[in-house]
Amino acid sequence: MDIKEIIVVEGKDDTTAIKRSVNADTIETNGSAISAECLQRIQHAQDVRGVIVFTDPDYPGRRIRAIIEEHVKGIKHAFLPKKKTIAKNGKSLGIEHAKSEDIRYALENVYTVQEDAQACTITREDILMAHLIGHPSAKKRRDRLGEILNIGSTNGKQLIKRLEMFQITEQQFGAAIAQINQEEENA
């Protein structure tokens, strides 16, 4: 699988995992303190070939994603759920621990943030009724929603923003919630 865009990852182990899985070039941020020089390289990459941000599903990864998104417009996002990035020893997580087929799947299902995004019609009340906030299993349900919609996991405060960012429709949201409910009934 050849990837035209340049993939932004956190470190050299992530680059190794990407290159083991697909034919692609990467830019490494070397942590969440992204330098101005690194942001300039990412902007240049976006201008020339396009960029896919593919960071770890943890706080530093989300922080890197947010910083890049703030400075570089029109980037694409690839996500993997936490459970697919956990090391065999269970002590760390990251893209470097993911299976090649999971990396390929994430890269086949990237999202582009739309600058002229429509206002999200999914409300806080919808999220509350779907037990995604204010419920004992809310975090687990949000994580599963992020997997189904391929938008990554998020906290309750950021969920509407993430749904809006990726232009998730009420139909997509409703279908995902129905799937989660069905899975919980069958568990």
Image (cartoon, rainbow, N blue to C red):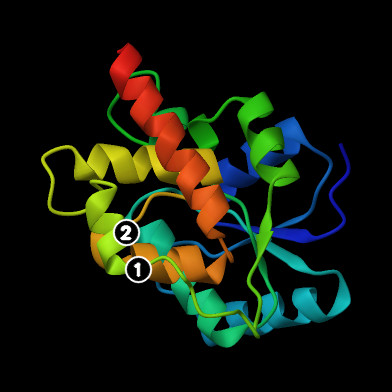
Work out whether 95 lies above or below 121: above
Q: CA distance from mark 2 to mark 1?
A: 5 Å
Assess disc 1: are there few (<14), some (14-19) or many (≥20) residues with their C-alpha within 10 Å of its C-alpha: few
> Camera-side residue: 184 or 15?
184
In which quadrant of the rendered image does the N terminus lie?
A: top right
Residue 119: % across, % down: 51, 80
Q: What residue sits 49% from the left and 30% below the top?
A: 97
Q: Secondary structure at mark 1?
A: loop
Residue type at numbered disc 2: Asp
Work out whether 5 lies above or below 165: above
What mark, if any, has residue 123 been given in the picture? Answer: 1
Q: Is residue 157 left or right of residue 2?
A: left
Whether residue 14 is visible: yes
Question: Residue 93 is drawn in which quadrant?
Answer: top left
What mark, if any, has residue 126 been given in the picture? Answer: 2
Q: What residue sits 64% from the left and 46% below the top?
A: 15
Residue 24: % across, % down: 81, 48
